Amino acid sequence: MTALPLLDVQGLSVSLHDGRETRHIVDDLSLQVGEGEILGLVGESGSGKTVACRALMRLLPEALSISARRITLAGDELASLGVADFARVRGRGIGMIFQNPASHLDPVMRIGAQIAETIRFARGASRREAKAEAIELLRQVGIPDPARRAEAFTHEFSGGMRQRAMIAVALASNPKLLIADEPTTALDVTVQAQILRLLTELRDRRGLSIIFVTHDLGVVSQLCDRIAVLYAGRMCEIGPKRAILGRPRHPYAAGLIACQPAAGATLTRLRTIEGQPPSLHAMPSGCRFNPRCPNAQGDCRSVQPPLDPVEPGHLAACFHQVGTTPRLGCAA
Amino acid sequence: MHRYRFVLQRPLQLIPVLFGISLITFVLVRSIPGDPARLILGTRATPQALAAVRAQFGLDEPLWTQYLYFLRNLFQGEMGRSILYKVDVLGLVAARIEPTLVLVFGAVLLSLLIAVPLAALSARRQGTLVDSSVRFFSTAGLGLPNFWLAIMLIILFSVALGWFPVSGYGRTLTDKLHHMVLPWLTVALSLSAVLTRSLRASLIAEMRSDVALAARARGIPEGAIFRRHVLPNSILPTLNLLAVNIGWLIGGTVVVEQVFAIPGMGQLLVRAIFSRDYMVVQGVAMVFAIATVLVNFLADILTVTVDPRVKL
Amino acid sequence: MSVAVPSPAAAIAAPRGKRSRRIAGLPAPLVAGLGLLALFLLLALSADLIAPYDPIFQDAAARLAPPSFAHPFGTDNFGRDILSRAIFAVRIDLQLAILGVVFPFAIGTVVGTIAGYFGGLVDTVFMRIVDVVLAFPFLVLMLAIITILGPGLQSFFIAMALVGWVSYARLVRAQILVLKTSDFAVAARSLGFSHPRIMFRHLLPNALTASIVFAMSDCVLVLLSGAAISYLGLGVQPPAAEWGIMVAEGQGFIARAWWISAFPGLAIVALAFAFSLVADGLGELLGQRT
């Protein structure tokens, strides 16, 4: 990326102050998303992906405090914005879609009305304009007979259609960046592929940037331009898709990729990374992955490895990267 | 419109309940010790009249035949005669419906007018002094005895301030409304305590819901989220609670009518109990029960109208 | 250098807000409610020692006396001390609230367990009865039954038992229906345990939580009903000191002596408040909404 990135996050941390102790759920996270780029944010559940995204939207419970060195969206500084000013960023700057549209869409408001409402609050359009635009949006996200479906309620949609409707609702405020928090996890494979195609189309047509949160590397390999791998709230590795999938440097990233069941592979036992992700209350010192890491050595247990470039645009936070030491990563 | 098909089907399902109601009232009156004919006509009845009643109700026949006679009479709108007022029970009850209806509807409306803003204020200012006060008063309000509240309101607003009449119902519309203010307030204050607690809890749950989160994420202002998403989704459990409590509410009006001397069904019931006017007790109890069943039916229709998901 | 991002809108409170403050590990409302109940119990047990006057002693010289040092709550038209009467009334009203719940609780629990466990015709019959009883406004049915039995505290308890069990039966039945398909119930059946043993030793203890919480809030309703019925003259009979009766006795003197009705009513509110607090606290402790 040579041009200024659309989103530039430097040193984002989310912490929980629990009596005397402060625990970091997200620790010093930095990432950039370019215009029209799709960044895959990958990690196990509990790795802080969702918390990091909600921190960007400031949609976290009060008990969690957010800090950052810098957050800019299209050059505008967000981190220091007051609560009232930041409200304007939600929707218009950054939009968000969720895993479960059934619970995130209002069950007692018609789909069209939810889109129109968003349009009116974002741009102050008239009711009539907003309604027409809502129907147009529903058409754009591939809902057949949009004029009629706009009058329907969430429960009258199928799972895939609901997800399309939620995308339409989120796009209604015309955000530059869309955060998609596992939007396809609950869908079956064919519908999932349709939604992924829709997101790619929207990127191509609208120049929309997307942060796609998932634990599914298969989805990432289809959709994303770049990949960021999170473990226990810290960035392990970030870089272009090809580089990460082809030659991962961080043992955790390598392990994740090795654990992905390959399409058409014969039935072998599913590979897993041994051990469990650490709990928030017992974070290991040094590299947070060290108790599970096959490459771990003394320094990993005492010093936190910095996120250093391994090649231009590809960074990894590991002292003993895969390929430089005996290759491991997964236990059969 | 197939979602409303139950409007036609439900009355059929209610028939067993209505039979049950008639059976219970029948059993109740027949459980009274003594000669039923004398109970129906009072102690000073002539032998001829007693014989006539025995024939009409089949009192010499087995109990189940008596029940059939009872049902037949019911279908003919024949609920017996009042000993005290010397008129047919049906007409007597019918004349008393209006004040009770006015009392119940006005009180429900007023309690919603009190509960919705209070619950909204409390939920939106959670943890503040306002919230604590609302919670304290709504919890204390659960235990307000309506007969005592009525007397306290009379002491304050009628005796001390002279704003409202002490009791009675009035003749003209404005006169009636003037008389009903304190009874409404009495019922509404305790009812709104129940509603406020329930609504506050639902509002808080909805404010933390995924729906509210998603609305925030797309830039809808907090106030609009509250009005457009939180409130509509919270109101339904409260309406259901209101329907469930309607029996309790109607029962409460019996006492309130007694305190304020409102000529409604409740007052009729209490007088009938004291004068052992059994046919009237039976008639009023049945009408009250049928009214409760109807209100629940209306609540179902309302639920289907408000919530597009519900199918009955 | 890193800046703290301004904290999010206050509306996004953490979901912990449902928990109230704790005292000695218990929810504050529970402790406060139990404390208040203990106070009432103490009043009931030691009314003879605490009450300044004999509750039925008529002081002709001090009729309709307003609250003063000698009579903190004033006196009634017979010159009886309102405070002393209100203290002695705790005995009856506490008994009213508690016994008025115990009988329906016991009957409803047994019926609900049997109906839920066996299902089929037994269940259908019992649940139809429940529907019909619930169709009557509670107080109206109570009054109708009391009409037949004649006024009095005993009639009140009988009527309460006849009418009040339905709520418990419904609640327990719903719990049993869920529990009877659970693993441990299936296991108990396959071990060949008898029906009563499975029902009452295995299922019921697990089903009771919800109805115990409900019973505490039901105490409020029963207390109010009992007082209302006594107020109407169909419950506890004068000259016994009972709060509902005392309110009724003051009604004729509202223009001259507000205190006769006011204080006994406040006592009802306080006792009801204690039960409500216990219900709220217990519900929170046991993870039940009331």
Image (cartoon, coloured by chain):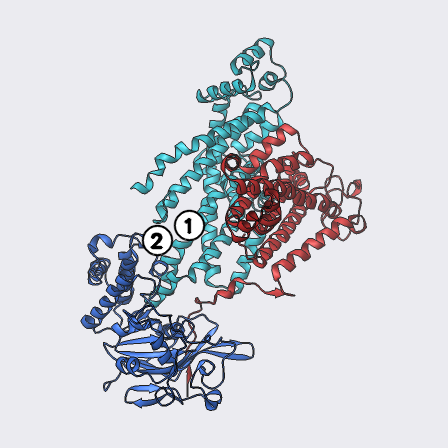
Colour blue, chain: A
User: Is residue C20 shown above or below A312?
Assistant: above
- Image mark for residue C63: none
Q: From this viewpoint, is residue C123 visible? A: yes
For label 1, the residue is: B236
For label 2, the residue is: A108
Colour red, chain: C
- Chain for mark 1? B
**Residue type, label 1:** Leu
Name the spot of residue A11 as percent of width and height, x first: 39, 84
Q: Residue at x 44, y 22 (%)?
A: B75
Dots 2, 1 in contact, CB < 8 A: yes
**Residue type, label 2:** Val
Q: For numbered disc 1, what is the local secondary structure?
A: helix
Nearer to us in this view, C258 or C102: C102
- Chain for mark 2? A
Colour cyan, chain: B
Q: For numbered disc 2, what is the local secondary structure?
A: loop
